[in-house]
Amino acid sequence: MRKLRVYIEIKGTEEYVGTITGNSASDAFFQYNENALDKKLRISLSLPLQAEPFSPERTRNFFEGLLPEGFTRRSVSQWMHVDENDYLSILAGLGKECLGAVMITDDEDPTPSLADYRPLSAEEVRSLAAEGASSAASIVVRSHLSLAGASGKAGLYYNDTQKKWYQPIGTAPSTHIVKQSHVRLLHVVINEQLSLLTAKNIGLPVPGSFILSTVDRKEAGDSDILLATKRYDRTLKDSVKCIRGCPCPLRLHQEDLAQAMGIPAAMKYENKLPAATAQPGREGSYLARIFNLIRAYSDRPIQDMVTLLDLQIFNVLLGNTDNHIKNISLFYSSDLTRVHLAPVYDLLCTQIYPGSAEEMSIAIAGVTDLHRITLQTFLDAADEIGMQKSMIRREYDRIHAQFVPALQKAEEELAASGMPMTEEIAERIMQLSRLS
């Protein structure tokens, strides 16, 4: 019988909150301990505080949601010599540094829980950019670090004073999520940075990000650049520990909406669900469920509902059909007593890539076809969203009017930094944007 210990960091202190016990995904269950119950240390909205163990399904839905997906997961499982469906073994190997403040350790792990930062040479950073997800997988395994999602990414520590990158080891927290260009998606780093800056210019909350070039920017190609995004779930404020002269950030908790609603990562796309499951246009639709979740749990529900609406409108205008529920997260206060919508992330125009899906990942009034979603579609979804049509119209018209100027400002800012292809990518996004 395997036992994984689950911890959550609260204000720099690791609190032991429970265990995952079982032989495999089919029988493993999570159970809170007395410490978690006494201190009210809930780790997920889908795992409310209770003495009874949770079912294997509910356990898996949350904890597997911490793991990489797709090619990165396959690469990680190969590095670890385990089956890619064995989420317990992968979690045991990677769980010391996850998204949010949760940490996982294995009772059978004979190695001590070390925390260290290993300096990365310029050549290693260059290799990370050039080799993509396979290189990221090796860093992930060596660092015991788990980042959810399907794209190649690594969690690194950036010392702003030294202007130097480090690889976190063991339980050492990272400060940035670093993404590589995708072999099938040309100029995706520039695409995502343009999209993030455009969203910021429109007023959406986004984390800080920048393009890291391993060669002269004027000569940089896809294999030479990385997108570094500052982790909003890490903070150097009140840091009390240093490793190799690097202030050690504190962990802050978050979870994505799939985890919060108890939905498995495999069902993150509403357009992939059977019709009877998706219930488009009704109370069970993803649109209705995510707005109801914000309304029920956010400590600033009105502000978050407007932001969530703006995000749906922005994704349609941008042509981002990869707007699934794992790309929206909740951010917890440092003591876990309050929760609200996290900054938005993973934004890009998917439509510039031939063969990309034309169905939105979250249906609007039952409509997933990107080309059929208009202002009227959003107005038809007023009951699901739970907002007045006048407010929906106001936000749609505002974002529609601001989109082009916001994109142009983003293009000017990025082009001024010396990145090639910026103007061409911005023009392509403009041509394909849903501004009708």
Image (cartoon, helix red, strand yellow):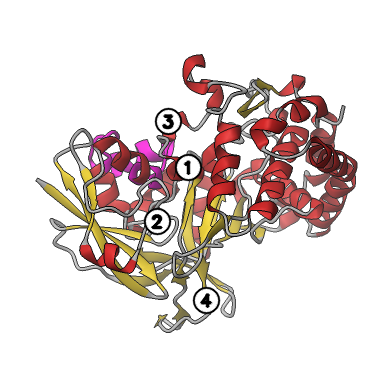
Q: Earlier in the sequence, mark 2 or mark 4?
A: 2
Q: Is residue 27 above or below residue 206?
A: above
Residue type at the position of mark 2: Cys
Q: Residue at x 90, y 47 (%)?
A: 405
Q: CA distance from mark 4 to mark 3?
A: 34 Å
Which quadrant would residue 142 be assigned to in this image? bottom left
Judging depth in this view, the residue of 284 and 118 nearest the camera is: 284
Judging depth in this view, the residue of 55 and 214 nearest the camera is: 55
Q: SS class of the residue under badge 1?
A: loop
Q: Quadrant of the C terminus?
A: top right
Q: Position of residue 240 (x, y in %)?
A: 43, 84
Stretch in magenta:
63-87
Q: Is residue 170 above or below residue 177?
A: below
Q: Earlier in the sequence, mark 2 or mark 3?
A: 2
For residue 65: magenta?
yes
Q: Are marks 4 and 1 in contact (CB under 8 Å)?
A: no
Location of mark 1 (residue): 149
Location of mark 4 (residue): 236
Residue type at the position of mark 4: Leu
Residue 129 seen by the camera:
no
Q: Nearer the viewer, mark 1 or mark 3?
A: 3
Q: CA distance from mark 2 to mark 4?
A: 17 Å
Q: Residue at x 22, y 47 (%)?
A: 53
The mark found on residue 266 in the picture is 3
Residue type at the position of mark 1: Gly
Q: Position of residue 390 (x, y in %)?
A: 84, 39
Q: SS class of the residue under badge 2?
A: loop
